[in-house]
Amino acid sequence: MQEIQKRLGNLGIEVPEILLPRNIAINKWALIACDQYTQDRAYWERAGEAAGSPSSLQLILPEVFLADSDHQKRIDDIHRNMRKFLDEDVFTAAHRGLVYIERATPFNRGRRGLVAAVDLEQYDWLPESRPLIRSTEGTVPERLPPRMEVRKNAAVETQHILLLIDDETDTLLPALGERAKKNPFVYQGDLMLDSGSISGWFLDSEDDLAFFAAGLEKLAGRALTRYGNNPGEHPFLFAAGDGNHSLASAKAVWEEYKAANKIGAGEINKLVHSCRYALVEIENIYDPAVRFEPIHRVVFGLDFDHTLKLLSALPGFSSHLVENRGELVRLTAEPVRGNRFGIVGKNTASGSCFALVETSASGISTACLQPLLDNISADSANFTKNDAAVNDAAVSNAAVSNAAVSIDYIHGEDELFRLAGSGEKPVTGILLPPVQKAGFFETIARTGPLPRKSFSMGESDEKRFYIECRKLFG
């Protein structure tokens, strides 16, 4: 077993000691990722009503509440609950192994994943770095502190990070599933608020872990052939799909721990501490059920006409009104040589309206759009910018009342259209086109991370739910 663990360690994998809720129904324990529904407090109120006690809701801080004045109390309560759950045996005994999961989503998609821990020494989010585990989207340092506050001194870790592998034959996870299903379920049940269902099985035998290691070694060798540019370069084995900032926060806490304990580079490999690792779910980018969805933008404090004016700075800009939502969605999704965006809001003259914007700018749509949104300023369009609000969706609730313009990042068309044009203050939605998976790993390997919030792995209700935990600083 020691040799297998060494092989997995070379691939950035640690076999974690998993904690699971004891005798608690999945639909009472599991909560959706904390960075969802950032503008929908009603969702989290319904989740609170649906959750049991204890539940993972008592271990996470939904980002919709980050701007509230009591957010520090919430973090203190989270840390208190973690210790309480351990003391009161809310969890089963720790079990060393991986968890193979199958998820049925509300959209008739069956996703497969594998819960493991990854070595933060083999991850870096800096754009110029080329480690084994790479960020796929731009990381905003200002967004890390709230997540770090939750992780620091946390007795328990539960995460919503999804890592992607580039397995074009889609064989590794299905093969692991066949092995896992020879074992009994470790959990099974429906997820709350009509979010589908989930099942989990342990993979913990020496033979199963050796099979996993061999599969990853094959993918790593292929990655070096395809994406390796320099002698001694690490293979590009894992791409952070969801939870980029949570993974970056875990890395930052580990770096702080090393600095506080004066751990030098030569001592790293001798040190095994729980905070060196982060719990993740591994999925295959080529799983047919893994869908890449755009993350739309909502601009608070900017009306329909002024949003069009802002976007007129795009190269080859043109725009025209369309009749309704359905037509706007269809046109935005059509493949074009450049890019298209749908604009949704209210016009002072005609009320609710929709416009299609076209630009000659090629590549992923966020590459041309995000710089304009980042640079909303008095000089560009006679508006002021709240930097924290533009850079952190989680605080945009407060920013609406404190700044002329703020930006939020929205998962799902329905939520975008609900927000656009709502309320007394101007609110305009920007509908982004679909995101293609083809060439994804090649693009990241060549150019580094995409602009932040460039894509989402599925709709909001398909996001990872918190189930598995492990001890962190406990």
Image (spheres, rainbow, N blue to C red):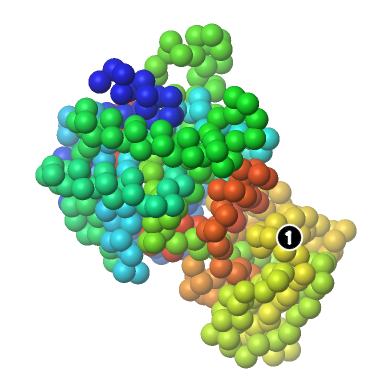
Q: Is residue 70 above or below residue 131?
A: below
166 or 159: nearer the eye? 166
Q: Quadrant of residue 428?
A: bottom right
- Report the number of discs: 1
x and y percentages locating residue 87 in the rendered image: 21, 27
Pick the residue in front: 380 or 40: 380
Q: Is residue 89 left or right of residue 259?
A: left
Give the left or right position of residue 15, taking residue 393 as reference: left
Residue at figure coordinates x 72%, y 69% from the top left: 338
Look at the image and tell me in which quarter the N terminus lies: top left
Q: Is residue 1 above or below residue 249?
A: above
Q: Nearer the viewer, residue 40 or 111?
A: 111
Q: Residue at x 34, y 32 (%)?
A: 213
Task: Mark yes or no: residue 318 visible.
Answer: yes
Q: Amino acid at mark 1?
A: Cys
Camera sees residue 187 = no
Provide residue 437's location: percent of width, then percent of height.
52, 58
Q: Quadrant of residue 396?
A: bottom right
Which residue is tagged 1? 368
Q: Is residue 122 above or below residue 238?
A: above
Which part of the image, by quadrant, shows the C terminus?
top left
Q: Residue at x 33, y 49 (%)?
A: 171
Q: Quadrant of residue 461?
A: bottom left
Badge 1: residue crowd in 10 Å (few <14, some 14–19, many ≥20): many
Compared with residue 36, is residue 211 higher up or lower down, i.e. above or below? above
Percent position of residue 440, x then y: 56, 53
Whole-percent x, y for residue 292 in the image: 49, 61
- Residue drawn at (38%, 44%) of the image: 282
Q: Is disc 1 placed on a helix, strand or loop?
A: helix
